[in-house]
Image (cartoon, helix red, strand yellow):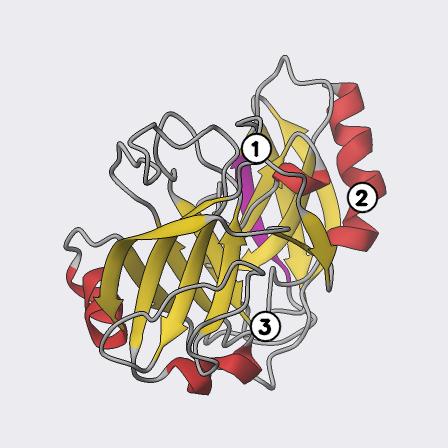
Amino acid sequence: MKKLLVSTLLTTAALVGFGGAQNDMRVYFETKGPDTYKDGTQVLDGEFYALVWTRADAFAGFNADGSFVNEADEVVAYAPYAKGGRLPFTAEAVPAAKVPDYADGSFVVVSLDTRKADGTLSAPLVKDGRRVPAAVNGYATASFVGVQAAAASAVLDFASPVSLATVAPAPNAPTPVITSVAKVGDRLVVKVKGTADYLRYNVAGGSTPDAMGGDGIADPKDGAADEESEIELVVPVDPKASSGFFKVIRN
């Protein structure tokens, strides 16, 4: 447990702060499966899916080079995460500046066929820091969900292959700072200052920085009345864990 505490303290300087802009939009998407290629075989593990936004009534599709038939369509996210013939639950953060662009239209989940002649998956390219398919042999529309329906699914809690979660803007909120971390039994008590009383706070954690994600693992707490006052966030931890990484997030 001593190693866990040391790792936590060493990483707080780099990891404090919110997990994204205050008014980012999160898009969640998945498929039920089993998804297949045009030849009827099940999609391979690691195959690409694409979350596409379109203003049209129907998705016009991809060209072989990965461009769109309808140039007005836009890829929100590529997800090379096929597993067991389907796309598992996947989350994508949309930067605040892009949110207004998706105010109407529809989201489309598309399964792609990026296989080579020998039947194996082609190696993806990297463009603008994200993996993209090198070629598109074919595609299939798995889901077509209107933006308003996707937003309603999150609010009304009904099943949808695409759902949205938006966070109310807080552009003037202070930046939270972890001031101390202490182990109490099988929990870490994380003290934080630089909070606002109109926001709720939580802690995201993981065994590595990449594994932290955006879901809170502590009991959420309201912010303090002023930036210098501290709040305490209590985080359950595995006593057997050899390391841990944590960041303060908005709940």
The three-letter code of the residue at mark 1 reads Ala
82 lies above or below 193: above
Nearest the camera: 1 or 78? 78
Q: Label 1 belongs to which residue?
A: 117
Q: Quadrant of the N terminus?
A: top right
Residue 184 image point, x, y percent: 61, 28
220 lies above or below 121: below
The residue lying at 29 percent from left, 58 percent from top is 162
The residue lying at 55 percent from left, 61 percent from top is 66
The residue lying at 48 percent from left, 71 percent from top is 68
Nearest the camera: 9 or 54? 54
Circle number at residue 9: none
- Kind of element beneath mark 1: loop
Image check: 200 left or right of 9?
left
- Kind of element beneath mark 3: loop
Total numbered labels placed on residues in the image: 3
The region drawn magenta spans 230-235
Residue 222 image point, x, y percent: 46, 63
The three-letter code of the residue at mark 3 reads Ala
Image quadrant of residue 109? bottom left
Q: Label 2 belongs to which residue?
A: 11
Indicate whether residue 232 is drawn in magenta: yes
